Image (cartoon, helix red, strand yellow):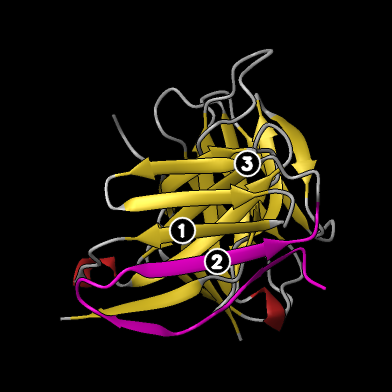
C-alpha cells in the first residue's frame, strides 16, 4: 500500500507569483483534503475534494483553488502569492464510503514547505 | 476566542513520566475528536480517535472526551524519548470534511 506523497518538498517563490502543489493520495482513497500549517500553528483546512468535486472549503480566499483528477490525485493552486502564504502545505487522503460511515481517517503526506519572498 | 485552544508548551518531562495533554473547544457541534502526533518536518499521524464522550485506550495512550465541559485529554503513560513531538488535537462535526486543529503542544521527553 502506497502512502500519501506530495511534491515538491520545498519551494521558494516571490510575491505575486503563482504556485502549484501536487498530492498523490493513498491507494484506494477517493477524498483529498488540503491544509495550511503556519510555523508553530496547527493545520488550517483549505478545502476538500471528493470524487473530483469540491466538497467543503475553509476560510481561504478564491486565489486558493484546487483540482482532483480521476485517479484521485490532487493539485493545490495559489495565485498572487503573498508573504503570509509561507507555510507547510499538507495533503490528507481518506476513503469516504457512499452513504457512509461518519468518520474517515485522514492520512497525511509529509507536506510541501512554501517560502514566499 | 479561538475555536480550539491548546497549551503550546513546550512541555518537558523525564522518561517514564505520565504526560497529560489537553484541549478545550467552543463548538458544541463537534462529535469526532482526534489526537495527532507530528514529528519535525513530517505530516501529522493519527494516534487516537474518539466519537462523542468517553474514554478510549490504546497501549500507552488514553484519550478522554468530556463534551459537557468541552474538554478533551490525551494521557501518555511510561513516556519515552521517542514520544518527543508536537501533539495536535483535532475535531470535526461531520464526515471529517473539516477538521479543526488546535495549535499543538510541543513535548520533550528527557532520557
What whole-number distance in Å separates the C-alpha atoms at marks 3 and 1?
Answer: 13 Å
Q: Position of residue A29 (x, y in %)?
A: 49, 27
| Quadrant position of residue B25 | bottom right
Left or right, A13 with respect to A53, comes to: left
Q: Contact, CB < 8 Å: mark 3 with mark 1?
A: no
Is any part of residue A8 visible from this angle?
no
Q: Position of residue A24 (x, y in %)?
A: 45, 39
- The disc, 3 or 1, on the residue closer to the chain's N-terminal end is 3
Q: Position of residue A86 (x, y in %)?
A: 61, 77
**Residue at 70% from the left image edge and 80% from the top image edge:** A84
Q: Nearer the viewer, residue A71 or B63?
A: B63
Same chain assignment for discs 3 and 1? yes
Say which element carries label 3.
loop
Residue B15 falls inside the magenta stretch: yes
Magenta range: B1-27
- The disc, 1 or 2, on the residue closer to the chain's N-terminal end is 2
What whole-number distance in Å separates the C-alpha atoms at marks 3 and 2?
Answer: 15 Å
**Residue at 84% from the left image edge and 56% from the top image edge:** A62
* Residue picked out by circle 3: B53
Q: Which mark is residue A71?
A: none
Chain for mark 1? Answer: B
Q: Nearer the viewer, residue B69 or A33?
A: B69
* Residue picked out by circle 2: B22
What whole-number distance in Å separates the C-alpha atoms at marks 1 and 2?
Answer: 6 Å
Residue B97 falls inside the magenta stretch: no
Figure disc tally: 3
Amino acid at each position: 500500500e502506497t502512502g500519501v506523497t506530495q511534491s515538491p518538498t520545498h519551494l521558494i517563490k516571490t510575491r505575486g507569483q503563482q504556485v502549484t502543489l501536487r498530492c498523490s493520495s493513498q491507494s484506494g482513497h477517493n477524498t483529498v483534503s488540503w491544509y495550511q500549517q503556519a510555523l508553530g500553528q496547527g493545520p488550517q483546512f483549505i478545502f476538500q475534494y471528493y470524487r473530483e468535486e469540491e466538497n467543503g472549503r475553509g476560510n481561504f480566499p478564491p486565489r486558493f483553488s484546487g483540482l482532483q483528477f480521476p485517479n484521485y490525485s490532487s493539485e493545490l493552486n495559489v495565485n498572487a502569492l503573498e508573504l503570509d502564504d509561507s507555510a507547510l502545505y499538507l495533503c490528507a487522503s481518506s476513503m469516504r464510503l457512499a452513504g457512509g460511515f461518519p468518520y474517515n481517517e485522514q492520512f497525511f503526506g509529509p507536506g510541501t514547505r512554501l517560502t514566499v519572498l | 476566542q479561538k475555536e480550539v485552544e491548546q497549551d503550546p508548551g513546550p512541555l518537558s518531562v523525564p522518561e517514564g513520566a505520565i504526560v497529560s495533554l489537553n484541549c478545550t473547544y467552543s463548538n458544541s457541534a463537534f462529535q469526532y475528536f482526534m489526537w495527532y502526533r507530528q514529528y519535525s518536518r513530517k505530516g501529522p499521524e493519527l494516534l487516537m480517535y474518539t466519537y462523542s464522550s468517553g474514554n478510549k485506550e490504546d497501549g500507552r495512550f488514553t484519550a478522554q472526551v468530556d463534551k459537557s465541559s468541552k474538554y478533551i485529554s490525551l494521557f501518555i503513560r511510561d513516556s519515552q524519548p521517542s514520544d518527543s513531538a508536537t501533539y495536535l488535537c483535532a475535531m470535526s462535526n461531520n464526515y471529517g470534511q473539516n477538521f479543526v486543529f488546535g495549535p499543538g503542544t510541543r513535548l520533550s521527553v528527557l532520557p
